[in-house]
Image (cartoon, rainbow, N blue to C red):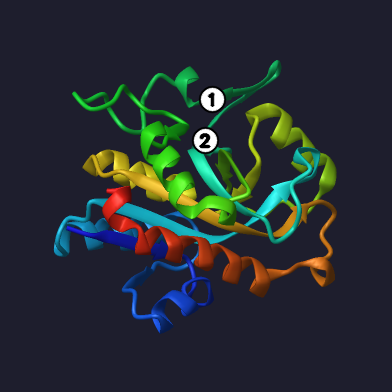
Amino acid sequence: MGIAVLAATEFEVALLKAAGYPTLVAGMGAVNTAHALGRHLVTQERPSLVLQVGIAGAYVPTGIAVESVLMASSEMFGDVGVLTPEGWLPAEAIGIPLVPETASHPALFNEYPCEAALVARAKSIAGSAIAHTGRFLTLAQCTGVRTLGDALHARFNVICESMEGAAAAQVCAIHDIPFLEVRGVSNLVEDRARETWRIREAAESAQAAVRRLLEGARRLI
């Protein structure tokens, strides 16, 4: 059993593939991610770990810099829940878990915690390549408005957003497989200004951190 490296796009794993590491490119978004990863888990040898790599937008109030590399302590869906006159409520308000309780974990709704000891080992192996760890947010749309981004940060206490992470974490929870996620910050979640983004640099930095983890796989898993 090994590590399944997952990404949304080819450019997010190009350096890892060039170095000879097998990767799974799922496509953008939660549905593509869940479909590709689910199919992989039932048709290939069961991995010891699923490791998602890619880019993300960091929320401005965190003070995190563009090109920083982040590791998830947990993943959560930001658009699964209930909008009420009193405000937004998480999926627990519906009362139907996205992943039922098992012997390995409680019922899971919006949030999918990464194993704390696994995150700590990964952080130790990656060293300075990982700048921050924290809660990641997954949305069906990118946030290109600063005021909305600040509100999401405040609501969920998250450090960055992407379009795939929680879907992969949910599939891993269903199959009881450990999950890690590493993302490079390509942009801040502010009023959309693509000319300021650093997509290539962020993807390369994230892959460099993941390569450290793959090289230290014996200590990681």
- Asked if 92 appears above or below 32 in the picture, the reply is above
Q: Residue at x 68, y 54 (%)?
A: 57
**Residue in view at x 67 percent, y 56 percent:** 68
In this orientation, which residue lies closer to the viewer: 206 or 90? 206
Q: Which mark is residue 90?
A: 1
Which amino acid is tagged 2?
Val
**Residue topped by disc 2:** 80
Residue 40 place in picture, x, y as percent:
24, 62
On screen, residue 188 above or below 147: below
Tell me whether the residue at label 1 lies in contact with that at label 2, contact meaning CB atoms closer than 8 angstroms.
yes
Relative to 88, residue 13 above or below: below
User: Mark 2 or mark 1, which is nearer the start of the sequence?
Assistant: 2
| Relative depth, front residue between 16 and 44 | 16
* Callout 1 amino acid: Pro
Viewer-proximal residue among 86 and 63: 63
Apparent side of residue 134 relative to residue 198 in the rendered image (left or right):
left
Residue 184 visible at all? yes
